[in-house]
Amino acid sequence: MASHIEKLIFAITLCLLTQLSCAIRISTILNPTRPSLSKSDQQSRDVHELLPFYGLPKGLIPNNVIAYDLADEGDFTITLEHSCYVQFDDLVYYDKKIKGKLSFGLVSDVVGIQAKKLFVWVPITGLKADEDSGSIEFFVGVLSQKLPADQFEAVPTWSELEERMNERETDGGRRKSIERRAILQEQGEDINELAEAFIKNFRNQLRIQRIESFERYQDMLARST
């Protein structure tokens, strides 16, 4: 009898431990915990070094960070030396102050980052790391786009950013100059055509007037005789 009771207790205990283990795993998946870093350890680290502890690549933020603050609840503020642009697949604008909420593999409630889609600037509202596909999913409201995470492994320096922007502005200026020359050339050709047509019409009018004047002169002579 005692043997049966011990077996029953053992079975119940094993079942409870299994359920508890499953519950812990599910809770971890649904509510990922923050990295076990002390406040002083966080403050001593560069923000780019901190991001990998949250399952995010360090190249999501440009290198001109002068300060950041991360609250226990995950709310953060990043202050850049100045607003800037970074060229990923799309051109991305970073405001001088960037705010949001950070948890493991996820950044939500983002303010201060915009991406240029075609001719429109759209605000990035959040991003999420997808380890299975090795990508970062960026959210623009209810819409999203995935980009390879390896694009963000390296932190672009300001000189690189400046050079990229200068190249972009130079290319843009060159394209605009070519477009302006094409427009002026087209307009010039139109003006030349109009001028030639005007001169041709003016000469025809003079020829007609000379003929009419000569006819009137002959008619006047005929009447006088």
Image: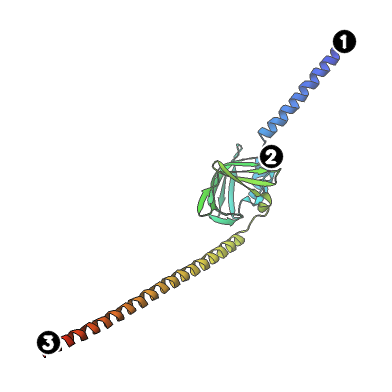
Query: Is residue 161 visible to the viewer in this orientation of the structure?
Result: yes
Circle 3 sits on which residue? 223
Q: Nearer the viewer, mark 3 or mark 2?
A: 3
Question: Which amino acid does the dot numbered 3 rest on?
Answer: Arg
Quick one: label 1 or label 3, which is nearer the N terminus?
Answer: 1
Identify which residue is drawn at 36% across, 74% down.
194
Residue 79 marker = none
Label 3 crowd (10 A; few <14 / some 14-19 / many >=20): few
Look at label 2 and name its amino acid.
Pro
Q: Is residue 55 left or right of residue 158?
A: right
Compare marks 1 and 2 and give the one earlier in the sequence: 1
Residue at the extreme left = 224
Label 3 residue SS: helix
Numbered disc total: 3
Front one among 46 and 121? 121
State the image coordinates of residue 73 (x, y, percent, origin top left): 60, 36
Please, what is the three-letter code of the amino acid marked with disc 1? Answer: Ala
Residue indicated by mark 1: 2
Q: Which quadrant would residue 90 be assigned to in this image?
A: bottom right
Q: Please report the residue visible at 12 percent of the width from the left and 87 percent of the height from the top.
A: 223
- Per the rendering, the mark at residue 35 is 2
Q: Position of residue 186 (x, y in %)?
A: 44, 71
Q: Secondary structure at mark 2?
A: loop
Q: Upstream in the sequence, badge 3 or badge 2?
A: 2
